[in-house]
Amino acid sequence: MSRGGFELDQETKLLAADTDPAVREIIRLSTKAEGWLCDSAQDGITALKLLRRNTYHLAILEAELPEVSGYIVCRHLRKSMRMPVIFISRHGNEVSRLAGFEAGGNDYVIKPFYPRELVARVKNLLDIWGHSSYASNVIRAGDISLDLGSHQVMVCGREVKLTPKEFDLLLFFLRNQRQAFSRDSLLQLVWGQDFFGSDRTVDTHVKSLRGK
C-alpha cells in the first residue's frame, strides 16, 4: 500500500525521533526484540525527511525535538498520512500533554519511561489501528464497506463523507463487531487514555455516524 495507510505485509516499521542517542538506542533494542524495524532521527527535520521517503506503521516523537519540534512534525504528518503517534517528553504538565494531543498525538509518555511499557503502548495502538490482524484493504459489514487505503466509506453503494474521528470510530467498530463497549472504554481505546473531555463526546460521534 502507498504512504497514508498500512502496508499489506506484516513487517512492522516504526520511526523513533529523539535528541538523546541513548533513548533512541533503547527504543531500537526494545522494538528489535519484538521483531519490528525502527528508523531513528535526532531532530525534526530528519524525521520529516524519513516520513517523506518511507512508510511507517507508527511514529514515536520527542515533543522537544530540535530544528522542528515533535508537535510540528506530527501536524505535517497528519496532513498526508494516517498512523498512530506517541509523544515522549520530560514534561508531564497539563499544558505540554494537551499540546501533544492537539497536535494529533494518540498517546503521551513521560521520561524516563519503562521500555516494556512503551512497547505495550505501541502494541495497543497498532492493534487499534488494525495492523496486528491486517488482512485486507477493505473491511465490510453488511451494507457498509471501509477502504483503509483511500479512506472511502460506502453505505449501500453510496459514498459517505466522515470526519477523521468518525472514520477512526467506525474502523474500531468494524474491527470489533458483536462486542459492546462503554463510553469510557471507547474514550480510552479510540480517543486515547489521556483524552480531556466529556464522555458525551462519544454520544455525539455515534449519533453522527448513525445519521450518515
Image (cartoon, helix red, strand yellow):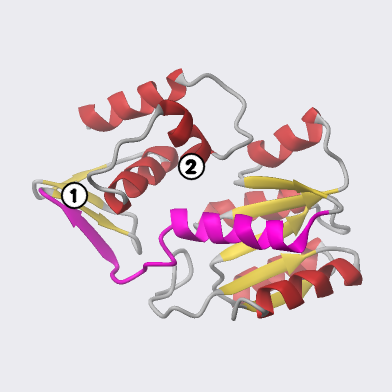
In terms of depth relative to the viewer, which is nearer, 75 or 12? 12
Tell me where residue 62 appears, x and y as whole percent: 79, 55
Is the residue 65 above or below the residue 161 in the image? Answer: below
Q: Was residue 125 drawn as part of the magenta stretch in this picture?
A: yes
Question: Which tag, 1 or 2, sits closer to the chain's start?
Answer: 1
Pointer 2 residue: 189
Pointer 1 residue: 154
- Quadrant location of the C terminus? top left
Is the residue 1 above or below the residue 118 in the image? Answer: below
Tell me where residue 60 appears, x and y as whole percent: 69, 60
Q: Was residue 111 drawn as part of the magenta stretch in this picture?
A: no
Tell me where residue 135 appears, x and y as whole percent: 31, 72
Q: Secondary structure at mark 2?
A: helix
Q: Which residues are magenta?
A: 113-142
For residue 184, side relative to residue 50 (left or right): left
**Of labels 1 and 2, the one closer to you:** 2
Mark 1 belongs to which amino acid?
Answer: Met
Decide if residue 83 is in sight here.
no
* Label 2 Cα crowd, 10 Å radius (few <14 / some 14-19 / many 20+): some
- Quadrant location of the N terminus? bottom left
* Label 1 Cα crowd, 10 Å radius (few <14 / some 14-19 / many 20+): some
Residues under labels 1 and 2: Cα distance?
24 Å
Identify the residue at image location x=50%, y=60%. 126
Identify the residue at image location x=88%, y=63%. 19
Rendering quarter of residue 182:
top left
Mark 2 belongs to which amino acid?
Answer: Leu
Identify the residue at image location x=67%, y=80%. 32
Identify the residue at image location x=37%, y=22%. 204
